[in-house]
Amino acid sequence: SAVISQKPSRDICQRGTSLTIQCQVDSQVTMMFWYRQQPGQSLTLIATANQGSEATYESGFVIDKFPISRPNLTFSTLTVSNMSPEDSSIYLCSVRVSGGNQPQHFGDGTRLSIL
Amino acid sequence: QKEVEQDPGPLSVPEGAIVSLNCTYSNSAFQYFMWYRQYSRKGPELLMYTYSSGNKEDGRFTAQVDKSSKYISLFIRDSQPSDSATYLCAMSKDDKIIFGKGTRLHILP
């Protein structure tokens, strides 16, 4: 499976600031996704990162809050904008190597705390 | 009713025991079923992936799917302390994956 690297691995940020999380894959992949994992909660899909076009957001997530880029088939970024303590969470990048209903593989996540 | 239900645990068992982890689901449209293992401060790691009812075995791990009962299980034989982790069930439909909340498992040496 693909090797997925996320940066930063963790950060502590001030309320009102923004943070960009990077996801780098060691091979070209069909699909890239961004998830949020809050304590005691299921992994929640934020959006599908589309190469060369706007991301597809799930209900409850909007582009102004979570802008996403995917300039090529191996890289994507997620920005958490105007952060508040409620945004404290683990943010995970995942990839699907090929199409169809193949499983997703995850990076190790970014642990984000907002003061 | 949530689409996927999973007991969060924690579940503590002695080393060498057989572990049984379970999930139930409500949507019969789910086609593919997965189990992920997540160690502390790490991302979920795919353990098992299956799309049919029945059993699938991989080493000490067996995944079982019962579509008629909407019930999936993961069995771990000869459990080791290194199996201590959170186990997430997941199932997919229409290219979307729905995850359970995860069960925390502790294997006691």
Image (cartoon, coloured by chain):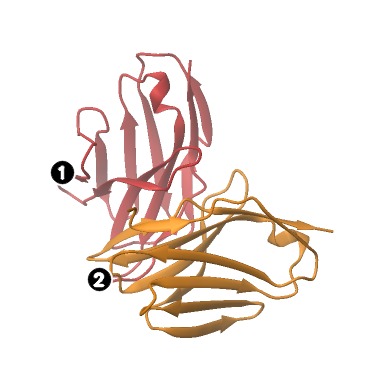
SS category of the residue bearing label 1: loop
Looking at the image, how many numbered discs can be counted on the residues?
2
Q: Which mark is residue B29?
A: 2
Left or right for A80, reference B94: right
Q: Quadrant of residue A96?
A: bottom left
Residue positioned 76% across, 65% down in the render: B80
**Residue B89 image position (x, y, % from top left):** 47, 62
Left or right for B72, reference A67: right
Q: Colour of chain B?
A: orange
Q: Which chain is red?
A: A
Neighbourhood count class around disc 1 (C-alpha, 10 Å): few under 14, some 14–19, many 20 upward: some
Name above or below for residue A14 compared with residue B69. Answer: above
Q: Is residue A13 visible?
A: yes
Residue positioned 55% across, 50% down in the render: B8
Left or right for B108, reference B96: right
**Residue A33 image position (x, y, % from top left):** 32, 51
Residue for badge 1 = A54
Hey, what amino acid is under mark 1?
A: Glu
Residue positioned 69% across, 56% down in the render: B84
| Nearer to us in this view, B103 or A5 | B103
Task: Tell me which chain the residue with mark 2 is part of.
Answer: B
Hey, what amino acid is under mark 2?
A: Ala
Q: Residue furthest bottom?
A: B54
